[in-house]
Image (cartoon, rainbow, N blue to C red):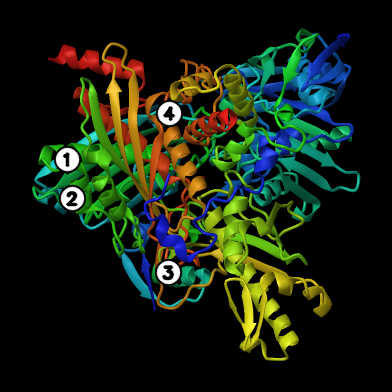
Amino acid sequence: MATKTPVSTTINGEPVEFLCEPRQSLLEVLRDTLHLTGAKEGCNNGNCGACTVILNGVAVDSCLVLGVEVEGAEVTTVEGLACRNELHPIQQCFLEDAALQCGICTPGFLVAAKALLDKIPNPTEEQIRFHLAGNICRCTGYDKIVKAVQHAAQEMAK
Amino acid sequence: MLRVFIPDALADHAAGEQQVELSANTLGDLISGLEGMFPGIGPRITDGDRLVSWLSFVINGELAGRSFLTPIPPNSEIHFIPAIAGG
Amino acid sequence: MATANETKTSSYRVIGTRPIRHDGVDKVTGRAVYGNDVQLPGLLYGRVLRSPHAHARIRSIDTTKAEKLPGVFAVISSADIDPHESKMAELGEGSVNLQYLCENVLARKKVLYKGHAVAAVAAVNAHVAEEALKLIEVDYDPLHAVTWVLDAMKDDAPILIDDLKTEGAPLPHSKGPTNIAQHIVFSKGDIEKGFAEADVIIEREFKSATVHQGYIEPHVATALWSPDGHLSIWASTQGSFTCRQQTAELLALPVSKVTVTPCEIGGGFGGKIRVYIEPIAALLSKKSGRPVKVLMNRADVFESTGPTPGSFIRVKLGAKRDGRLVAGDAWMAYDAGAYPAGIIGPGCVCVFSCYDLPNARVEGFDVVLNKPQTAAYRAPGSTNAAFACETVIEELAEKLGIDPIEFRLKNAAKEGTRRPDGPAYPVIGLVETLKTAKAHPHYSATLEGPNRGRGVGCGFWMNAGLKSSVTAHVNGDGTVTLVEGSTDIGGTRTSIAMQLAETLGITAEEVVPRVVDTDSVGYTDVTGGSRTTFATGWAAHDAAIDIVKQMSARAAEFWKCSPDEVTFDRGLFSSKSHALTFKELAGKIQETGGTITGRASVEAKGVGATFGTHIVDVEVDPETGKVKILRYTAVQDCGRVIHPSYAEGQIQGGVVQGIGWALNEEYVYDADGRMRNASMLDYRMPTAVDVPTIEPVMVEVPNPRHPYGVRGVGEVPICPPPAAIGAAIYNAIGIRMYELPMSPPKVCQAIINEASAK
């Protein structure tokens, strides 16, 4: 079996150390080693976006990042969006606007939406759709997701 | 009295009849009754103590069970339609 | 977005409102436990070896090397599961042949499609399991494969199942082995006479490619076979009880020895009813003595689960000059996939279901070929059929010079209309959807610009009733815990809880819904057939009535009167000068005899069918053949809407799946029968940039036979899009498309063909 490498990183604002094999993806480390199962495996090849996390400020598919690559990095997962027991406005708006059905793609959309709003606080509908095009949702037809992100942008501007 | 529509798939067993009337309280009774009228039709649509899986049993427009015990209300309209797979 | 009739529900306090779903916070914080999130001490990871051939005999399987790999705990093949005879097991909605199910779970003598499971490994982690798969030596004898339905029906076609017999109507010329698993014929009136009366007759042929449900969560199952012989399964399934039954039957266990816990599920759409990996996980657990989680990868999902049938359909319709349809004839051949599947049945029932045809004949074939065994997908069989029928309807309307909605209104099915398969409709809402669509501003809006067009289309789904059970416990604080067995795929915890709350006069938030395992609630059929809000909601209503009856008796004890003298209205128990709210009385029940539990098990009758009428504007790029959706309005009879947001969501989601089916999605096969696009990049499902806002317009024609007027909502919205988009393309560029998907290469080719024909 392959030998393991120690990795020091920051996840959701907290310092984290873990051991991982060179072939393990960040998604696998998050889910199986660190038990942060909010990031979902939908395709494991970067096509669906269900495993989206923010890596040093950029939304990435964690299935396409190796665990060893996050040495010294800052990672935000869906578990890091809420502040203690207070939901992030994007989470709250997804709930209020019924922007999820089965919910499996939801963590990826929430994280991708946060990355977008961090960069563009008041995006147009076209910008939202473009930035979320790497995340596939098979249930909602996207409309309620787009509206929830618009709603969250308004809430965050208050 | 039940009004029973004979499906086209069984037309060769039913001497061309498209509708018959008979009395029955359960699906099992009904199939026995049909067999009495049209010998050979029973085995065609029976799998053990059930209706064959390729037909659905419909009472008054409503899907019902395939078991011979399935009750039939009086004066119902009976159809056998192609089995439904669900989503 | 307001529903068309939202104000009419004002007599209700809970129904028609939009509470936040009960499982919402878990799902936006990443805490909800989906199938792949299950962790157990000592968990092993299972992977499945799949056939690289579309059709081959298995000469031998040698697992010796794989078993010796360090970290491998168990290897299984079909030798580890006893064969089953051809016997049907009922699954509520549909049934399953155990012999075929068993062979589909692990191939025995032959593989019948690329991706067919052959062997499986449990190892310390997924990487070791995948390495071990490469060490399994399978000796195949490849055979010719067939993947087009009409080819598979030919006399000289490769035969998949040697002893297959055609069920249903006799085939006049059948002799020897066949791939035709089922032959359906039904008719109404006299079609020869009908066509003889017609002034206009149009007959067309249609092809549809195989498409997949495309749920984002791959199939996953975790099994623990305990030394006491009890099998526990944590599954991503639409129906825990049907999962239990199939697994128990395959492994020759009594159902009481199997507990299935339904995890949160990442989409199903009909594709997560049949078992694939649950028995494999169980056998690996039995062999290793450890819990085992089997997860499919995305290629596995495409190549070995649930696609819905590709099809060939010929539809002929005749009409009088005044626009009355007089006759219809349909000939339909659907893929069964590797084993008989029966999606053709509902396909045949649905093809003419929107219209009042005095004379009609429908003939259908379920055809075995070298693709994965097909499964239900949102109104299974209906979308292929609607594309064919509705396109011919459009052509007739054009030829007769009648507005397409007006033409449909002249012929629309209504209460009492007999479908060609026989049954007469109860109260239905097709006419209401057509009238609402015609009056909608979208239908009369100006559409300017080159290569732009508008189309309409209708769709039908019959919906299902079936069995549901709930129990409801009254808590001392006036809340009610609602225990149910219906997998919640799109907010049904809440739509069911709302019906309980409405009946008890409490708020949706005062209900605590819990979806529990198969040992903790009575038998409940699958979440499918648009039945859950209808049937499990009905059970919740009945359990609430049970609670009211018991609480009235308690109130009568307090008030020293007869229970008959206690009335209950909107959460208030009263008798003469006495009154107690539900909450007040709930606080006293422990002192007056203890807990009150309401129960109900229903076999729901009175199913209400659903219809939709859609309007779409498109723009076609004549250079590339790409079709852009500019505007989309989906009118649907939803019956009484319980939670408008989630009903709208069903419509919007179904339409976008229909758009994908219409414009892009297809299984691409090579000459050897191998799927060449088994990834989400190459199997192109719609993304947020591919679609505009889908405007849902909910018409409410309550189902008179349900306590709250509920019909199913979820399935019918996928049916109209391909036909409506096809009509819009015609109105944009003057070319009719007869093949799905209407993808850029096909539209481009059609434009080139049209130009060269001129």
Answer yes or no: do the residues labelled 2 and 1 have beta carbons within 8 Å? yes
In the image, what residue occupies the spot 41% across and 33% down?
C693
Q: SS at mark 4?
A: helix
Q: Amino acid at mark 2?
A: Leu
Q: Chain of mark 1?
A: C
Under mark 1, the amino acid is Leu
Badge 1 marks a residue whose secondary structure is helix
The residue indicated by pointer 2 is C325
Q: Residues within 10 Å of mark 2 (few under 14, many from 20)?
A: many
Residue type indicated by callout 3: Leu
Q: Which mark is residue C185?
A: none
Q: Quadrant of the C terminus of chain C?
A: top left
Q: Which residue is mark 3?
A: B34
Q: Residue furthest right?
A: C227
Instruction: Give the left or right position of residue C177, taking residue C242 as reference.
Output: left
Mark number displayed over residue C396: 1
